[in-house]
Amino acid sequence: MERISLSNSAFEGDNNAYLFADGAETVLIDTGDWMETTREQLEAAFDERGLGLADVDRIFLTHWHGDHTGLAGTIQAESGAEVCVHAADAALVAGDEDAWAELHELQERYFEQWGMPEDKRAVLLEFMADGEATTESPSVTSFEDGDSFSVNGTELEVVHASGHAAGLCMFELSGDGGDAPREVVSGDALLPVYTPNVGGADVRVDNPLEKYLRALRRIVDADYDRAWPGHRDPIDDPADRAQYIIDHHEERSWRVLDALDRKGPCDTWTVSDDLFGDLESIHILHGPGESYAHLEHLERAGTVVRDGATYRLAADVADELAAMDEKRWELEY
């Protein structure tokens, strides 16, 4: 497997596509975004290896977001490649109009519930529409957690890691050698610099923070030797990175509770503003989305109480916060 680094003008950090071309098949995991620059970079990487996009036989997608799927339809049109994605994301990747309409309707409901200002909502919707309008949709084949695929002597086992996206999956890699390192293509489940957004990146996910924390715990328990992420450089201690992100979310939950303690009852947008400040582009979605994921998780734990769109601390929580030495709230998942 070879990592191909691709530019990303829409999100933080260069994208990665992973190429298997050392056997009978030419296979990609993820394609990068939809930009012409990205296509040129991918074509150049293929050309260096004596290949063209028309040689691609199969594409495996980690999840439905456009910076990972953007060229899947274009490549399929040239090569006839089979495009494979988890069943939860299949309809969106395939461009199903009903699925996209349901997503947009759900987003609008959350924007209203979160208290997102109209001017910020307009900026966000324009940003999202730019990406969706320029993406050519492929036909897709769906897979499920635990499915396994043989690619040029390497086995790819699907590991469903919902949270950031409903159908987000990792691919465990294994070959013939018993002493080979245990590696995983982690997509956006595990990133080396940024912590993947939960709550806003896919509003279809119920209990997104709980699901994501469980996915991270699965990575810790697996104790992989290396992770190949959807953005930036490989991760040489995936378990340590996953534990760091778990700790990060417990620190963030403390900050959410601290905001409610200082400000009193307030909506999601107010909490987001306290955590992240003024937001632009896709962060207008990600900031309140992640704040909501934490508020929702804390509400189900009985730590906060929701009245309509307003959240407040449950009884005695303010006293617990004041007595804590460490600014981290332990989360149950």
Image (spheres, helix red, strand yellow):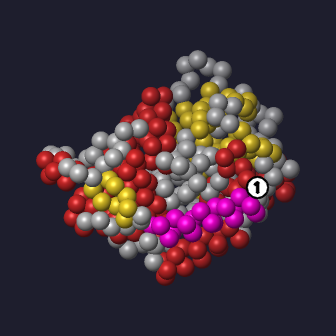
Which quadrant would the C terminus be assigned to in this image?
top left
Give the structural element (helix, strand or loop) at label 1. loop
Is 203 situated above or below 129?
above
Q: Is residue 209 left or right of residue 138?
A: left
* Residue at x 42%, y 64% (from the top left corner): 308
Most prominent secondary structure in the magenta stretch? helix
Percent from the top left, x then y, of residue 315?
Answer: 23, 51
Extreme residue toward the bottom, this view:
119
The residue carrying mark 1 is 94
- Label 1 crowd bin: few (<14), some (14–19), many (20+), radius 10 Å: many
Q: Nearer the viewer, residue 283 or 112?
A: 112
In the rendered image, which quarter is residue 309 located in? bottom left
Percent from the top left, x then y, of residue 2?
Answer: 63, 42
Is 117 situated above or below 211?
below
Q: Nearer the viewer, residue 246 or 179?
A: 246
Q: Nearer the viewer, residue 162 or 41?
A: 162
Look at the image and tell me whether residue 112 can be seen.
yes
Q: Confirm whether the magenta stretch covers residue 91.
A: no
Q: Is residue 289 left or right of residue 128?
A: left
Extreme residue toward the top, this view:
178
> What stretch of residues is rendered in magenta?
97-114
Which quadrant would the N terminus be assigned to in this image?
top right
Q: Confirm whether the magenta stretch covers residue 100.
A: yes
